[in-house]
Image: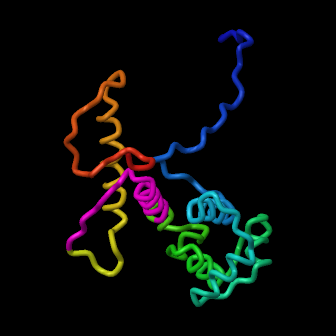
Amino acid sequence: MAMDDGDERGPQPVEPPGPDELPRFDSLREKVEYMVEKTFPGQKISGRVFAELVRDRGGSLSHSYFSNILAGKVTQPSEDILKALGLGFGVDWRFFKEESEVVDDVVAGLQFLAKRRTGEISGLAGRGLDDDGLPPELLRFALSLLEDAAREKDGPEGQSGGNDSAVSHRPAGPAA
């Protein structure tokens, strides 16, 4: 029989995903909050501003309905509402579906754009692209190259690695 030494550990806290990990969403509210944070970084977006943005892009969404989504009061919106959210955020509306096959693709695309914005990616040449742009698989591959390059740069015990990379990589921040 095993003895209890009194050193029981309770449930371990769940760490938020790292910067290059894909987050998991349990609700529409979490998806919309994530999109607000990633689409409008550092900005406070009101329901009225978002509703106007949707309207400018050809959709329809009331400011109070958007506010209710953010408050967690709306959990099963119509497909039209999901399409309006997609218009407002400029992403595939299926991202907002409860069981969505495109969540990882949308998140990978946003991470890619964020790295582009911060200067971690300074250029990308795409040949033979259609109107849909880069396929999600290519976005994920490019992100994995960036992660590999960052690990290679740091090397073991913080030593600088080689400079060979398929991705033009430069530190974030203002140009010197």
- Locate residue 35 relative to residue 136 in the image: left or right: right
Above-or-below relation of 117 to 3? below
Q: Please name the colour scheme applied to the rendered image.
A: rainbow
Where is residue 11 drawn, in percent x and y?
69, 31
Q: Is residue 123 magenta?
A: yes
How many numbered dots are placed on residues in this image?
A: 0
Residue at position x 40%, y 53% in the image = 119
Q: Nearer the viewer, residue 109 or 159?
A: 159
Above-or-below relation of 28 to 24? below
Span of residues in magenta: 106-127
Residue at position x 56%, y 80% in the image = 87
Residue at position x 62%, y 59% in the image = 37
Q: Nearer the viewer, residue 109 or 115?
A: 115
Q: Quadrant of residue 148?
A: top left
Which residue is situated farthest in the front direction here? Answer: 176
Q: Nearer the viewer, residue 16 or 5?
A: 16
Q: Quadrant of residue 176?
A: top left
Q: Is residue 94 magenta?
A: no
Above-or-below relation of 72 to 1? below
Residue at position x 39%, y 49% in the image = 175
- Locate residue 142 relative to residue 63 in the image: left or right: left
Where is residue 29 drawn, in percent x and y?
69, 63
Where is residue 146 drawn, in percent x and y?
34, 47
Q: Quadrant of the N terminus?
A: top right
